[in-house]
Amino acid sequence: MQKKLIILPILTLALTTLACSVNINIPVTNITTDETVTEEIRINKPDPSAEITDLTINFGLGELSISPGAETALVTGTATYNIKDLKPKITTEGNRVILETGELEITGIPKFDKAEKNEWDLELGDMPLAINLNAGAYSGDLELGGLSIKSLNIMDGASTVKLKFTEPNPIEMDMFEYQTGASSVKLYGLANANFSEMVFKSGAGDYTLEFSGELLRDATVTINSGMSSLIVVVPEDTSARIFFDSGLSNIDIHGDWQKNGNMYTLSGGSPMLTININMAAGNLTLKN
């Protein structure tokens, strides 16, 4: 027993001495800016015979705007940037297209001087699409109403995003999945997305999911959120049921919701909207 008591302080002292003698250098990447360039983007449909075109947009940082309007192409628009390594890159293979922000490599901690610019203003065509959007710390203004979207997958980091479906999706969407980090995300007109299943996963942040529009069929939504502020808005004429699972969250109810245990319901004349909410902590607000 005594030997063990002697060895423990010696090991502790040795580890402490080693830690003090080691210098850990974290590399810092300086982001340098160049002359501002505005580049036209035009991507034609890669395979005219394909029923679905797979479009992937990889956007690292900056401001991204997407809307309908490309009348004779898959994607049209502009990219304005002043970091040469952010020059847009387009890859096409079969019915797949990848549009991404260049080849900027960041090792360690990036050092910005607030003069960087990377702004994309894109319009998408009306052909059936499977859309994958992968983004980092960015500001997004996304209008997807009226587009023919078969599937939609969005993954982003610390971001500020407003996404709208102001017009109905003319085709049935199989899956809408949104994964985000510590962000502020507001989704509007979700009934117009015409999905059968939606999954929303988030960390800490501020989130609004608003289900206005025309609900054409039964739909299921699963929301898994960390410590966050979550607002769910369902029009009062929608048939809806919400199952809420959280022991550490508050819930505020506004409107005609009926409570039965952990289930909240609305009686409307539409198909059924089922929403399953699992929150680690925070505040949930239900509205009509």
Image (cartoon, rainbow, N blue to C red):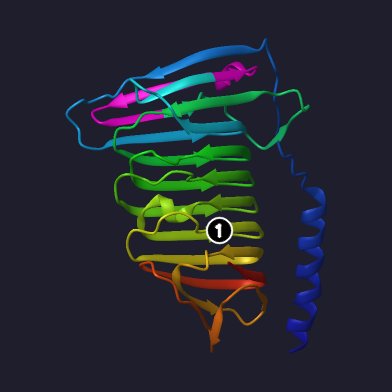
Residue found 76% across the figure and 76% down from its top: 8
Q: Identify whether 122 is placed above or below 188.
A: above
Above-or-below relation of 60 to 238: above
The image position of residue 81, as x and y in percent, is 62, 19
Residue located farthest toward the left when viewing the structure as drawn: 49
For the stretch drawn in magenta, what is the main secondary structure? strand
Kindly indicate the quadrant of the structure image that contains residue 56: top left
Q: Secondary structure at mark 1?
A: strand
Q: Residue shown at 40%/22% (left/top)?
A: 90
Q: Amino acid at mark 1?
A: Leu
Image position, residue 18 (x, y; %): 77, 55
Label 1: few (<14), some or many (≥20) within 10 Å? some
Magenta segment includes 78: no
Q: Quadrant of residue 3?
A: bottom right
Range shown magenta: 79-98
Task: Classify the position of the C terminus by image quarter.
Answer: bottom right
Q: Nearer the viewer, residue 27 or 196?
A: 196
Of residue 74 and residue 59, the one placed in the foreground of this image is 74
Q: Residue at x 67, y 23 (%)?
A: 117
From this view, report whether residue 189 is shown above or below residue 146: below
Residue at 61 percent across and 11 percent down: it is 37
In reply to whether residue 92 is colored magenta, the answer given is yes
Q: Is residue 128 left or right of residue 256?
A: left
Residue 102 position, x and y percent, is 51, 23
Instruction: Give the residue number, with chain letter if any, for mark 1.
Output: 209
Residue 179 horizontal side relative to residue 16, left or right: left
The image position of residue 94, as x and y in percent, is 23, 28
Total numbered badges shown on the rendered structure: 1
Above/below status of 52 relative to 250? above
Q: Quadrant of the N terminus?
A: bottom right
